[in-house]
């Protein structure tokens, strides 16, 4: 149960970070 929660949390952070990076790359 805890592992599942951590996994989804990690995926969420990764997606947020990737989205932020994509937005930054778009502006340049």
Image: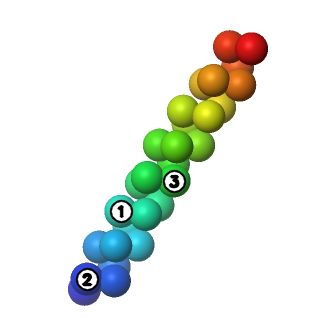
Q: Residues within 10 Å of mark 2 (few under 14, many from 20)?
A: few
Q: Read off the residue under disc 1.
A: 9
Q: Residues within 10 Å of mark 1 (few under 14, many from 20)?
A: few
Indicate the quadrant where residue 12 lies: bottom left
Report the residue at 71% width, 25% height from top.
25
Residue labelled with disc 2: 2
Local secondary structure at mark 2: helix
Residue 24 numbered mark, or none: none
Q: Quadrant of residue 8?
A: bottom left
Left or right: 14 with respect to 5? right
Characterize the local packing of mark 3: few (<14), some (14-19) or many (20 or more) Cα atoms within 10 angstroms: few
Q: For the view shown, which residue lies furthest in the right direction?
A: 28
Q: How is the image coloured?
A: rainbow
Given the current orientation, which residue lies at the most extreme top position? 27
Q: x%, y% of residue 24?
A: 63, 23
Marks 1/3 in contact by CB < 8 Å: the verdict is no
Q: Secondary structure at mark 1?
A: helix
Figure quadrant of the N terminus: bottom left
The residues bearing labels 2 and 3 have C-alpha atoms spaced at a distance of: 18 Å
Q: Which residue is mark 3?
A: 14
């Amino acid at each position: 149960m805890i592992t599942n929660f951590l996994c989804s949390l990690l995926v969420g952070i990764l997606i947020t970070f990737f989205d932020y990076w994509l937005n930054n790359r778009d502006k340049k």
